[in-house]
Amino acid sequence: MLRADKVAQALKKEISNIIHYELKDPRLGFVTVTRVELTADLRYAKVFYSVLGIDEDYKKTKEALDSAMGFIRRLLAQRLRLRFAPEFVFKEDKSSEYSISIQKVLEEIKKEDEPKKGNRLPKR
């Protein structure tokens, strides 16, 4: 399994570089490749990405990534010395937005639990 982890990290790095430096599609927003999951035979991969923005930004970015999939795969085959360039699909990763919303809820709870300045009891 160690080899699959190394290949997944290499794919993540290369796909991220290709998206940021070589794709010129105006539909691409601020995209971050969060992780890559590979099958054991290294033939198929799920590339998870996150976008800074609203749901419409996710939709436009998904369209741009799907249309550039062949270009990205060809560059991966040239750059990574693998027997087969894996076939991959792009999947939305909204875990960062979920963690931000949880953080906001926790901050609100903390504010509600703090005693008001005027309602403090005197120390004994």
Image (cartoon, rainbow, N blue to C red):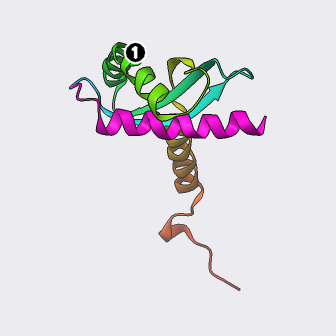
Please give the name of the residue rendered at 66% of the width and 83% of the height, measured from the top-left corner: 123
Q: Position of residue 29 (x, y in %)?
A: 30, 31
The residue range painted magenta reads 1-25
Residue 93 appears in view: no
Q: Position of residue 12 (x, y in %)?
A: 52, 36
In the shown orientation, is residue 124 left or right of residue 47? right
Please give the name of the residue rendered at 53% of the width and 51% of the height, measured from the top-left corner: 107
Q: In which image quadrant can residue 99 be found?
A: top right
Return the residue nearer the eye: 76 or 29. Answer: 76
Return the residue nearer the eye: 65 or 55. Answer: 65
Q: Residues within 10 Å of mark 1 (few under 14, many from 20)?
A: few
Return the residue nearer the eye: 39 or 58. Answer: 39
| 97 falls in the magenta region | no
Q: Main secondary structure of the magenta part?
A: helix
Please give the name of the residue rendered at 49% of the width and 41% of the height, measured from the top-left corner: 13
Residue 43 appears in view: yes
Residue holding disc 1: 70
Residue extending farthest to the bottom is 124
